[in-house]
Image (tube, rainbow, N blue to C red):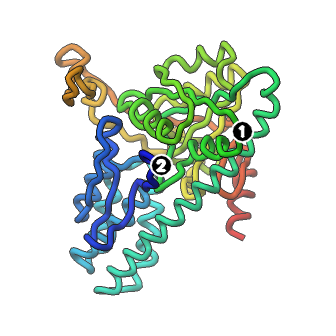
């Protein structure tokens, strides 16, 4: 991604300092802060506190966390993996990356294990960039076809997105936003309706910031405005990411995604979900009853953070004292509401048969 015109990743290894650098996403959009992860605990805190967020980026951060942990104790592979595994329960890329680390690193010991852990984390980093660019190319084909249908009656293609599935949710490019970036590169006049995405406001704070950096036209809306826009013909497609997708095509994503899918279905608007193959959890069929849903701190709902008119950071209460709050972080959209699944190796319908073919072809 470009930040102030300069290429920057969300995470990378600094060989001079022997640290892992990340963009602290909790400080956006008001401050661009780069943090050094120097220990296993730093990596665990970065994931749990959402300094890094987005399923693919969580997976890569976990791999670097394994390296940082092994640097402290080369014999502690299993304990390190277990500590990282508890940081965020919903995103399947976390367990995917940790399982890959276990499979590769258990064959090594001592200093060789540490070096292999760093090498593996860097491989996952590079793979993620290539995978997300592939997702963008595959999804841009859909938007290009949609624009060919729409362009005679309008001057832009309106896409609604929820939460942040851009470069900052991955190492680079993103998933859903990679589709936007690739479409824009093809000359398609894309305009993005950005859900604020309460309670942490990832849409307002991160997606808007990221789209502005890339020069993509966009408009921020409250979460509940999407259905209204769809009813009045202002949305041509809904495009979101995913934290876990089941074998039958159920999609788990940021809370509120399900409501967008319902509104899209009612208004005959395509609902696209973009994610890497590693986000499939083929051990699960029924997403509604089998995917663990993270419930986060109630303070995220009861308080809002921002800048005062004087430019000082402040957190204020927005509900009466002693109000109880329930803060589910994700919901599940049933496969029947999903128009297409977009991956780096192709696009398919959200059905068990189509998914099996897509994944099977990849395996071959």
Q: Measured along the vertical axis of the image, is residue 294 above or below residue 263?
A: below
Left or right? Give the position of 152 relative to 313. Answer: right
Q: Return the disc, 1 or 2, that comes first in the chain's sequence.
A: 2
* SS at mark 1 in the image: helix
Q: Position of residue 183 (x, y in %)?
A: 67, 42
Front residue of 154 and 86: 154
* Residue at 74% over, 51% down: 354
Residue ID for mark 2: 2
**Dot 1, how many residues are within 10 Å of its Cα: few (below 14), some (14-19), or many (20+)?**
many
* Residue at which label 1 appears: 143
**Is any part of residue 169 visible from this angle?**
no
Dot 2, crowdedness within 10 Å: few (<14), some or many (≥20)? some
Residues 134 and 357: in front is 134
Q: State which quarter of the image contains the C terminus.
A: bottom right
Depth-wise, is mark 1 or mark 2 nearer the camera?
A: 2
Q: Is residue 33 left or right of residue 161?
A: left
Query: How many marks can you see?
Result: 2
Residue at point 51% right, 28% down?
A: 194
Name above or below for residue 26 compared with residue 77: above
Q: Position of residue 196 (x, y in %)?
A: 44, 27
In this orientation, does residue 265 appear?
Answer: yes
Residue 180 quadrant = top right
In three-dimensional space, the C-alpha distance between marks 1 and 2, rounded to whole angstroms, equals 23 Å
Residue 36 locus on image (x, y percent): 26, 59
Q: In the rendering, at what x and y percent does residue 191 appear?
A: 61, 29
Residue 304: numbered disc? none
Residue at (56, 35) in percent of width and height: 216
What secondary structure is marked by label 2?
Answer: strand
- The residue shown at (32%, 79%) is 114
* 54 sits to left or right of 225: left
Residue 264: quarter of image: top right
């Amino acid at each position: 991604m470009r930040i102030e015109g300069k290429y920057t990743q969300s995470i990378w290894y600094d060989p001079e300092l022997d640290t892992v650098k990340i963009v602290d996403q909790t400080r956006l959009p008001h401050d661009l802060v780069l943090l050094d992860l120097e220990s296993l605990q730093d990596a665990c805190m970065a994931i749990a506190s959402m300094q890094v967020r987005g399923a693919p980026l969580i997976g890569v951060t976990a791999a670097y966390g394994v390296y940082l942990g092994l640097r402290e104790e080369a014999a502690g592979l299993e304990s390190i993996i277990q500590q990282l595994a508890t940081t965020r329960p919903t995103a399947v890329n976390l367990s995917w990356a940790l399982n890959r680390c276990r499979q590769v690193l258990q064959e090594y010991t001592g200093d060789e294990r540490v070096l292999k852990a760093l090498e593996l984390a860097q491989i996952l980093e590079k793979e993620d960039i290539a995978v997300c660019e592939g997702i963008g190319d595959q999804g841009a084909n859909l938007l290009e076809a949609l624009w060919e249908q729409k362009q005679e009656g309008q001057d832009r293609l309106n896409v609604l997105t929820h939460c942040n599935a851009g470069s900052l949710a991955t190492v680079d490019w993103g998933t859903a936003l990679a589709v936007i970036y690739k479409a824009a590169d093809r000359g398609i006049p894309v305009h993005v309706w950005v859900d604020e995405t309460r309670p942490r406001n990832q849409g307002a704070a991160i997606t808007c910031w990221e789209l502005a950096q890339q020069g993509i036209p966009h408009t921020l809306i409250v979460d509940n405005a999407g259905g209204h826009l769809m009813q009045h013909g202002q949305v041509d497609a809904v495009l979101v990411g995913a934290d876990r997708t089941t074998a039958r095509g159920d999609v788990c994503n940021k809370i509120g995604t399900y409501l967008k899918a319902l509104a899209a279905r009612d208004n005959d608007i395509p609902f696209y979900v973009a994610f890497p193959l590693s986000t499939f959890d083929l051990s699960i069929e029924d997403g509604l009853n089998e995917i663990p849903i993270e419930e986060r701190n109630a303070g995220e709902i009861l308080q809002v953070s921002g800048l005062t008119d004087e430019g000082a950071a402040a957190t204020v209460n927005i509900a009466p004292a002693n109000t109880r709050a329930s803060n589910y972080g994700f919901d599940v959209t049933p496969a029947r509401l999903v128009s297409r699944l977009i991956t780096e190796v192709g696009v398919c319908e959200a059905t068990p048969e189509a998914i099996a073919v897509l994944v099977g072809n990849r395996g071959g």
